[in-house]
Image: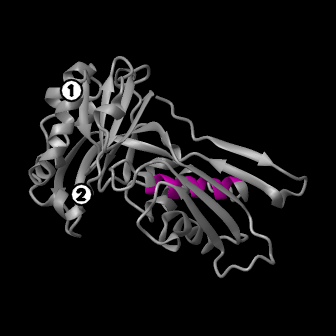
Amino acid sequence: MAYAVCIIFLTFAKNNKYTIMVVFPCAKINLGLNIVGVRTDGYHDLETVFYPIPLTDALEIKHMDKDFPSDVNCDLKITGNSIDCDEADNLVVKAYNLLASDYELPRVHAHLFKRIPSQAGLGGGSSDAAFMIRLLDERFRLNLGIAEMERYAARLGADCAFFITATPAFATGIGDQLEPVDNEQGNLNGYYIGIVKPNVAVSTREAYQNVKVEKPDVSCRTIVRQPIDTWRESLHNDFEDSVFKIYPELANIKQRLYQLGALYAQMSGSGSAFYAIFNEAPNNLGQEFPDCFTFTSIL
């Protein structure tokens, strides 16, 4: 899958400062997730395949007028899905401040329309931050380059660097060490994806509470190169056993997705969202899970 980082330029006046730029930060899923070691800094080493999906937010910026009364240099407004944090603490603002510490940036208005659910394991906040870096680089011609943008993004979160290019990647370390995944047999083009996010927030402590730390016999990178109908028995998310003990209703969601015809279903990240891969578009996913956020699309 070649999921393009999409930047749209909308120019409303000849003066460059009135240009509005829009990007569409995408979500990701984890194709397998194995906790393979404990680090001396207290974090865990993992192995996973990050895969972008066409569930997106929308993020735009424009110049802030010099006379606009604002105490902040990045004035962020958030609409769409609610987020449980102050706008000043949002990763979009942190991305702006990070670049502004090294580059002279003008004050900006930013508008983030949230569609990717939070506390889902879909990387929505990390994606917003990475796309903000790309947006600022493009808008103000910082000429950072991919590698430099990835370094900045990694300072904001372990999986942020992935979203700079938003192309399938094998991730190790704490999720910050990326290698390309380009084997066509691991390509999901033409399949359909369904997302189900229940109203459950899984904390990091809960996710790691009973997780088994063990390097698998076969890496998820190798498994995703095999036909998708083999994944159910071999491709695992190590967080599921731990999380299902605390929230058994989540195991029921996975089981129901298989009953609906999924070729493969898994919790993404540490949850609580699930994804399922189908040969054909799933019907009435919203009716099957009426109290959950749902999303379907072709990949």
Viewed as shown, does residue 134 lie left or right of 20? left
Q: Quadrant of the C terminus?
A: top left
Would you place residue 109 above or below residue 255 in this image? below
Q: Position of residue 215 (x, y in %)?
A: 14, 45
Q: Which residue is mark 1?
A: 258
Asked if marks 2 and 1 touch (Cβ < 8 Å), the reply is no
Secondary structure category for the residue under label 2:
loop
Q: Amino acid at mark 1?
A: Tyr
Look at 40% across and 61% down and name the residue there: 157
Q: Residue 252: give x, y in percent of width and height.
A: 16, 38
In this rendering, does residue 187 appear at all?
no
Instruction: Single out the residue that lies furthest toward the right.
Output: 14
Instruction: Locate residue 204, reporting x and y percent.
Output: 23, 62
Task: Specify the segment rendered in magenta.
Answer: 125-138
Residue pictured at 43% horizontal, 38% vertical: 52
| Disc 2 packing (10 Å; few <14; some 14–19; many ≥20) | some
Q: Position of residue 268 (x, y in %)?
A: 29, 44
Q: Nearer the viewer, residue 261 or 147?
A: 261
Is residue 120 depicted above or below 49 in this figure? Answer: below
The residue at which mark 2 appears reads as 202
* Residue positioned 72% across, 55% down in the render: 139
Q: Amino acid at mark 2?
A: Val
Judged by its main secondary structure, the magenta piece is helix
Instruction: Specify how the rendered protein is coloured.
Output: one colour
Determine which quarter of the picture holds residue 38. bottom left
Answer above or below: position of 152 versus 55.
below
